[in-house]
Amino acid sequence: MRNLERPPKDIELQVGYYCLDTFTPLNSNAYQAARGAVDCAVTAANAVLDGAHISYALVRPPGHHAERRTFGGFCYFNSAAIAAHHLRDYGKVVVLDIDFHHGNGTQDIFYERSDVLTVSIHGDPRFAYPHFSGFKDEIGSKEGEGFNINYPLAEHIDAEKYRRTLATAIKRIKTFNPAYLVVSLGLDTAKSDPTGTWSHNYEDFFKIGQLIGETKYHTVVVQEGGYRTQTLGTNAKHFFQGLWAGFFGEEKAQKKTNK
Ligand SMILES: [Zn+2]
C-alpha cells in the first residue's frame, strides 16, 4: 500500500514504511470524534452552498492524512476531501492544503480525477512527515494527470518565500477556475510549532489569509494541524481577518469585524 518507488533510506523511516504511524490510536472515541469532524465539514460546505462566502469547520481530529486505504497522522476520515467531493456536485472544486505537512490523503483520494484540483504547500517530505509523498513530480495520473500540484519547501524558509509560493499556487488555481475553494488550514506552519520548522507569526497568517481571500472564491476552511496551543487562537483569528479583508476589501472588512 506504500509508494514502492520511494522507499526511505533512514532506518527509522523504514520501520514506519509499513505502518502509517504509531500515534493515531483507534480507541472507543475515535469514530465518534472523526465522524463529528466530517459532519461539521459537510455542514460548512452546505453553508457555502446556501450562500455564505466563507465558512469554517473548526474540527479535531484533522483529516488530510487519511487516504482511501490508510489512516494516520492523527487523521481517520478526510473531512476536507469529503466536503470537496460534496461541493463537486455543484461546480469545480480546488483543495488548497496549507498545513505544514503534505496532505497525502487528499492527494491520494483525488489523484485520478480532473474535476477536483489538489494543491499543497508543505515541508519537503525528505525531512517532513509523511515522508513518502508530497514530491513535486507527483502530478496525478490517468484523468487526473496535471491536476495535483505539490510545492515542497525547504526546512527553513522566510515568510516572503512562502508568500511567493502561495502566489504561484493561486495563479495555477485561477487557470482551473473553480466554483468553490476548500482550504485545509494547518496552523503548524507557525513559529515554535512542535511538529514544524517554519516560523509564521500572526501577521504572516493575516497576509496568507488575505492572498487567499483576494481570489474571491466561495471558501470552506477545514481545520487540519496546529499544535502550539499558546498561539493557535491568535494565528487562526488573524488568518480569518486576512481572509475576510481579502474577500471584502480592508474597509468593509473592518466594519464587519466590528459588528
Ligand atoms: Zn500538519
Image (spheres, grey):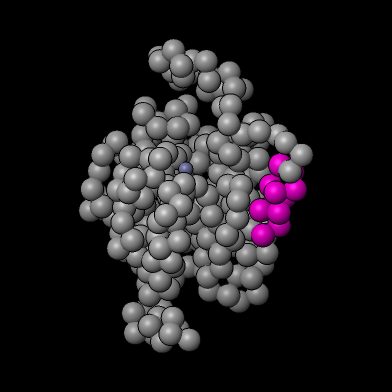
**Observer-nearest of 56 and 85:** 56
Does 185 lie within the magenta span? no
Q: Quadrant of the N terminus?
A: top right
Residue appearing at x 42%, y 54% in the figure: 230
Residue 9 in view of the camera: yes
Residue 138, above or below 42 = above
Residue 6, above or below 235 = above
Q: Main secondary structure of the magenta part?
A: helix
Q: Position of residue 207 (x, y in %)?
A: 32, 64
Q: Position of residue 199 (x, y in %)?
A: 30, 48
Residue appearing at x 39%, y 66% in the figure: 238
Q: Position of residue 256 (x, y in %)?
A: 45, 84
**Observer-nearest of 146 and 43:** 43
Residue appearing at x 44%, y 12% in the figure: 11
Tell me where the magenta segment starts and ends, as one range.
Answer: 30-40
Q: Position of residue 178 (x, y in %)?
A: 50, 61
Residue 23, above or below 46 = above
Residue 211 in view of the camera: no
226 on left or right of 201:
right
Image-quadrant location for residue 56: bottom right
Image-quadrant location for residue 239: bottom left
Residue appearing at x 69%, y 47% in the figure: 34
Please tell me how many numbered marks the rendered image carries: 0
Residue 124, above or below 78 = above
